[in-house]
Image (cartoon, rainbow, N blue to C red):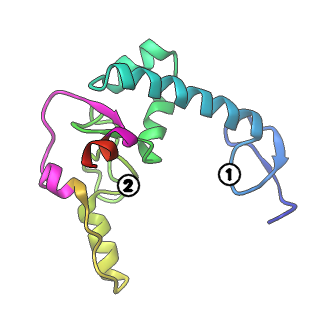
Amino acid sequence: MANDLKNCKRCGKIFMYAGVPICPECLAKEEEQYRKVKRYLDKHPRAGVKETSEETGVPTGIVIEFLRQGLLVAVSGPEGQLTCMICKRPIMSGKICPKCEEGLAIAAGKAPPQDAWDRLNKSTGYPNKERMYVMEMISKKKE
């Protein structure tokens, strides 16, 4: 893996793979986009995906990718755009819902994870109003 050459998932350019599937230039651009989104959400913590995208100039797909990576959390669902990769239910962050995550843990013979979102959301639908937060904000409020 140390000397692997790969094509960047964003721009297609060949680069030395170091565990991240995008080239250093695209990574720097993505980090700047995240900083823009974070600054915006710091000032407008209840903004939705579409509003955040329009106000920051960061494409909606990138904002949704930040949700998938767990960098952002949609407290009340990102307009139905983020769904569990297994059951297709709406989720707030990541790639799979807490119920499927628990099922995978049980199937693997491990104890199911304690998920804060179960307490927040009770594994049901989300309110109609969309809201997003930076994950750091939620952590700070718990302290």
Q: Which residue is mark 2?
A: 85
Q: Is residue 118 above or below residue 66?
A: below
Q: Quadrant of residue 105?
A: bottom left
- The magenta segment: 118-137
Task: Report the Cα–Cα distance between label 1 and label 2.
Answer: 21 Å
Structural crowding at the residue carrying mark 2, measured as other residues with C-alpha within 10 Å and reported as few (<14), some (14–19) or many (≥20)? some
Element assignment for label 2: loop
- Is residue 42 one of those drawn in magenta? no
Quick one: which residue is furthest to the front in this view? 143
Mark carried by residue 37: none
- At 26% from the left and 25% from the top, the residue drawn is 46
Would residue 30 be visible to someone looking at this image?
yes
Q: Answer with the quarter of the image where residue 90 lies.
A: top left
Identify the image quadrant of residue 125. top left
Q: Name which of mark 1 and mark 2 comes first in the sequence.
A: 1
92, 37: nearer the viewer: 37
Residue designated by label 1: 20
Question: What is the quadrant of the N terminus in the image?
Answer: bottom right
Instruction: State the image coordinates of residue 110 (x, y, percent, origin top left).
Output: 34, 83
Comparing labels 1 and 2, the label whose residue is closer to the camera: 1
Q: Name the side, left or right, on which 7 lies relative to 131.
A: right
83 versus 119 height, above or below:
above
